[in-house]
Structures are given as structure tokens and as C-alpha cells.
Image (spheres, helix red, strand yellow):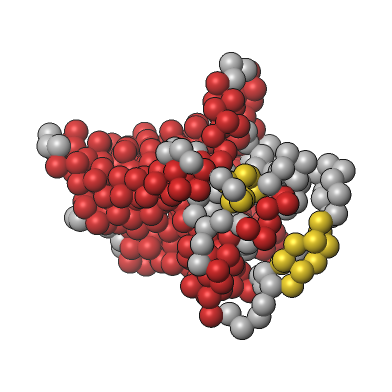
Amino acid sequence: SIAWEMGDQGHLTLDEYEELATDEYYGNIGWIVPAKSTAAAVYPPGTAALAAPLYAIWPAEAVVQTVYGTNVAAPAVDIPIPPLAPAAITSAVVAAIAVGLLALVFREFVSGHLAVVSAYVVGLGTGVWPVAADALWQHGPAIMWITAGMLLSVRHHAVSGLAFGAAILTRPHTALVAAGNGLWQSWKARSIRPAALIGVGSFVGLGTLVWLNNQLFGSPSITGGDGDRFAERMASLDLLEYAGNILLVFVHPMRGVLVYSPFLILLLPGLRSAWRAAPAWVRGSAVGGVLYLLLQLKAEGYSGGSGFWGYRYPLETLAATAPLLLLSYREWVVDQSALIRKVFLWLVAASLLLTAIGAVI
């Protein structure tokens, strides 16, 4: 809805959805919160901004429909439902661009053939296909900008920061990937320059987000309309639940990343060898990606809700750690026995089949 409002009406508020900005509808029919004298989406605007230009020129209009809640017993409400095609097209194109950029990232340390094949494995053997490319989630745009940031960080730190800034405007805690990348490069080079340049570029996205939240909600913040809920979740001292989230994000039968992308299992033993061979930008991005996931699990848990196939919360982490994981293949898997290599290929095939099932059904 926010992408349609941006493209069709030219603003970030959801005036036509103001009725939904109450607790009984929050998370039930939509994720809409009060915003000054009107309503707004709880999410940052980065994702919607990508689809807004297509909505601005799309010939079909929104259609008013009666919508019923699914999570709680809330009254039915009549709201405009925009056409889904612009969102679907944007999602698919953004995911495809992200995979293409990932191939260029991989080309920095493996052959062109292996880089392309590996990028396809990530695109078709993980949640990128059935989740990020399937609907206008935040994950596809965040992955695209993270991958662009990593690619540019090899030689163009300032422009890399702008890409990471776009990721922050899409999913704010991706700032950890930018920080990891820049700080690790600075530490390795014994120079403040990489961190400073990446930091300045990233701050453009962060500053824009804070300014927009101040305009929408009346106070400068990173979390915007979700501030109170976010603070409560982060302040929780239930460490047992947190530990459970960390375990379940990997092995839960419906949401586990190792369940739906089992080829990752055979890359884990090679991470030590990969780390020794990895350049600073690969190491820093991977560390930032892991910290991103730990923060995500603390703030939201492991499941990510319903209405999708497999997992979604680990997707940004997979993007940030993908170069290190490919180095694990290069440094460890290819040196193992023929049996281990064959098992890896079978696990890749199983991952492709599992994601294909989710993308088709």
C-alpha cells in the first residue's frame, strides 16, 4: 500500500488506511501505525520507493474491497487494494539484480564460470527465490543493496557507503554490515579512510531515515512507528528464548535455514580455511551479517510469521556471508574426497528442489 501511495499520491502517509492504525488491526490486517494526524506504515520507505515509479505509471487503479482479519476477531473494513503486478514485477527484478551483483562479487576471487554458477545456487537454492522474489518484502531490496555495497567496497569506499545507506533506508539494522565492512578494512589497512568513507555514505541513508521518521511521527528515530515495541523486545531478559531463537533459525522444520538450504551444512566445516583466505571486506561483511542476524533474532524471533515458504530473516545474513561461504567451498569442499563432493552436489540439488516447490506452489 505504501508503494502505491508513494507512486500514486506522492507521499509517505497512508491517509486512506487511517482506520487501520489501531491495536486491533495492527498485525491483523496490516502493519499500520498512527503518524501525527494520519497513519503510516511501520516499515522504512526504502522498499516501497523501488516500486513507487512503476505504480505511478501503472494503468490499473486501486479497488475498494472488504478485508477480514485473520489473526484476531477484528471488524471487517473497506480499504483500497492496489494492483499487485507492480509489486510483483519489482520484487522479481530486484532479486534478479541482486543475484547478478552477487556473481560480480564472487568474480573477485573465483573464475567467472564458478561465480555465475554459485550466484545461481544462492538465487535458486535459498529463500531468495520463494521469498524475496515472490513478493515486495524488504529482503530483496536489502540483499541488492548489501551486495552492491560489498562489490563497491573493494575499490570505491564512498560509493559503497551510499549503497549501504540505501540498505539502511530499507532495513535499518543492515547498518551492522556496513560497519563491519568498513571497520574491518580500516583495521587491516591501518587507516581510518575505508571506515570513514563507508561511514559517511551510510550516514546519508541513516540520516534520511531519521529525518523521515521525524516528519512522519514527530520525533527523530531509527525505529519510527515501531519504537516502543522494538524497545520492549530488545529489553527482554529472557535469554533462554533468545538461545532457542538462535537454534531454531537453523533447524526448525518449517523455518530452518539448514533445513531448506542443506548445502550450507557442508560449507560450515570449511569456514576456518575460508576465513584465513578471505580479504578484509569479506571478513567484515560476514561479521556484520552475523551480528545483523543476532539482533534480528533478539528483536523479532526466528519465524518471521506466515504466508511464505521456508525462511526469510536469515536472507540478509546469507547475502553478507555469501563470499565467505564460497571461499569455504573453494578452500575446503573441492579438496575433499569424491564422496564429500558428490554429497555436496546432492545437497545443492535438494536445496534447488525445495525452493522450487515453494516458488511454484
Quarter of the image holding residue 232? Answer: top right
Residue 77 visible: yes
Front-lying residue, 223 or 162: 223
User: What is the x, y in percent for residue 191?
Assistant: 12, 37
Q: Quadrant of the C terminus?
A: bottom right
Which residue: 33% across, 63% down?
104
User: What is the x, y in percent for residue 167?
Assistant: 41, 51
Front-lying residue, 291 or 24: 24
Q: Would residue 38 appear left or right of 66 to someone viewing this image?
A: left
User: What is the x, y in percent for residue 81?
Assistant: 71, 67
Furthest residue in direction bottom, as rendered: 59
Residue 237 vs 300, above or below: the answer is above
Which residue: 42% across, 39% down?
220
Which residue: 37% across, 67% down?
113
Front-lying residue, 51 or 88: 51
Residue 283 visible: no
User: What is the x, y in percent for residue 122?
Assistant: 50, 57
Residue 148 vs 196, above or below: the answer is below
Which residue: 36% across, 45% down?
206
Furthest residue in direction front, as rendered: 37
Front-lying residue, 16 or 157: 16
What is the number of callouts on the image? 0
Q: Would residue 292 appear left or right of 159 to someone viewing this image?
A: right
Q: Would residue 309 appear left or right of 6 to someone viewing this image?
A: right
Residue 228 vs 71, above or below: the answer is above
